[in-house]
Image (spheres, rainbow, N blue to C red):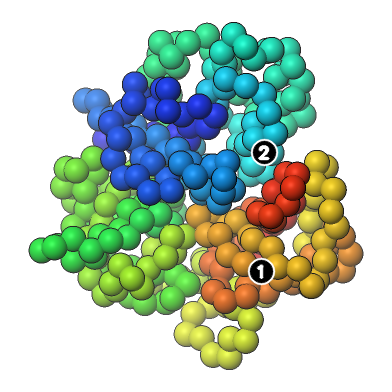
Amino acid sequence: MKSINFVILGDYNSIASELGKKGTATDIAIYDRKTSDVIYTWAAPVTFPDKIQSLMQTISIAEYAILNLTKIDKYLGEQIIALDSVDFKDGFILHSYEVDEEKLKTLIRNTSVSHFKFLDNIDQLKQEISRLESKGCDGPVMIPLDHAFDVKGVGTVVLGVVKQGTVKVYDQLRIMPAGNDIVVKSIQMHDDPVHESKSPARVGLAVKGMTAEQISRGDVLCLPNSSYMKTIPAAGATTTTITTTTISTTKFVKNSYYKGDLAENQTYLISVGLQIKPVRLKLVNDTVVEKIIPESKPIVFVPGQIYVLLKPDSQGTRIIGKGILE
């Protein structure tokens, strides 16, 4: 069974229910649909534009994007910047008659969104979707978690997309950055029980070893030998049982629309996959970050992963820029 995951941006309300059935809905809404050989999932950032966090997190869930536009405003600009920050190139654009297409093309020029395909209507979108291929990734299993809750008679259930590898029933995995070991008791895809799921499947896992209260969005399930996952410890951390690192000096590319300067006495939010956490910086200068210092909770990452710095209270764009974690 193939899996294909999307993020819907812009006016998601007008098309999401035509694409799939609404399921889990918090600050992120999940829609899905199953055909004879494919499970489709669409994620939408319910709390955007009020909060930038859900925008970054829904983009992280997906392999394909859909921009359904009814107007050009600063929030569209922010969505384009967010997609471009993580080099998101695969997607589709629909827009109403009120949107000037030439102005829109000028806006996305020189961004990854310029690779998106323009479509006339939702029927064309459905046809394009039916021709897409699943974008799985081989390697050691890695599942960033977006929801966790307790189910009576089942126990702890976590939801997430298998970003890499394969997960099987009775697998022993480790949840990072906590470092706790868990056992997968059962797996569901689209409410159907399965014995295993391969990347990029969206899964619900019943797990033993942690409660839902101990699990946060952005935590990652991986193999017990989790040396391929690295962790930046929180400020003041003294001992830890997990593999840790401090980032090497890295070039930081500031978003040209962000007019402020980076400062060491500021608290920012860092977006790494599904993780959104407060950090401070140690700087060489405005374009070189020497060290990222999480204020309260550690950050887990794969070397080479993109991070995006955010400033939620900014009056202009809230996306400062991006770098690479090594």
**Badge 1 density bin: few <14, some 14–19, many ≥20, Cα 10 Å:** many
Counting residues from the start of the chain, the first of labels 2 and 1 encountered is: 2
Q: Quadrant of the C terminus?
A: bottom right
Q: Quadrant of the N terminus?
A: top left
- Seen as rendered, the residue at the extreme left is 153
- For the point 21% across and 25% down, the residue is 36
Q: What residue type is labelled 2?
A: Glu
Give the camera-side residue of 222 and 7.
Answer: 7
Residue 265, position as x, y percentages in the image: 79, 72
Relative to residue 170, is residue 307 depicted above or below? above
Q: What residue type is labelled 1?
A: Val
Residue at which label 1 appears: 279
Relative to residue 172, is residue 64 depicted above or below? above
Residue 144 seen in the current view: yes
- Label 1: state its secondary structure: strand
**Residue 67 occupies quadrant:** top right
Residue at which label 2 appears: 78
Q: How far apart are marks 2 and 1 (CA)?
A: 21 Å
- For the point 80% across and 46% down, the residue is 258
**Badge 2 density bin: few <14, some 14–19, many ≥20, Cα 10 Å:** some
Residue 168 seen in the current view: no
Relative to residue 76, is residue 292 depicted above or below? below
